[in-house]
Amino acid sequence: MNGDPLFIDPSWKRTVTFTTEDPVKLPLPSREYLEIHAACCRVANLSGASERIDTILREMEDIWVLSQDGASAEVLRYALWPLSQEISVY
């Protein structure tokens, strides 16, 4: 096995099958949304954006204190983004 974390073993299946025992309480994800997500991931990867996203996610895990000079502002913005989606504005 290759030590590279980005290495995908060619023997692994390329098809993933989702199943559920309770389609009402645990519905399967939308095939269309998964296809859109996969396409967006391919574009991000090919454009080099995935490297920047990975860097930001690693920084979010490693940074415990924000810098006073504002250098960590982008990391803070991405860290707070999910919370901003939960706030209702009227």
Image (tube, rainbow, N blue to C red):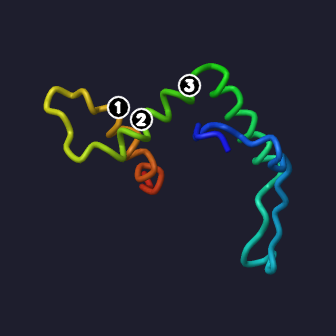
Residue 1, position in %: x, y?
A: 68, 44
Q: Residue at x 66, y 37 (%)?
A: 7
Residue under pointer 3:
49
Residue, far top: 47
Q: Amino acid at mark 2?
A: Ile
Horizontal side of residue 45 vs 76, given as left or right: right
Q: Is residue 73 left or right of residue 58?
A: left
Cα distance, mark 1 to mark 2? 8 Å
How many numbered tags mark residues here? 3
Q: What percent of the width, then of the height, locates residue 33?
A: 76, 47
Label 1 CA crowd tier, 10 Å (few <14, some 14–19, many 20+)? few
Residue flagged by tag 3: what amino acid is it? Ala
Residue behind mark 1: 74
SS at mark 1? helix
Residue 71 coordinates in the image, percent (x, y): 25, 27
Tag 2 or tag 1, which sits nearer the N-term?
2
Q: Is residue 67 above or below residue 63?
A: above
Discs 3, 1 touching: Cβ within 8 Å: no
Q: Nearer the viewer, residue 37 or 15?
A: 15
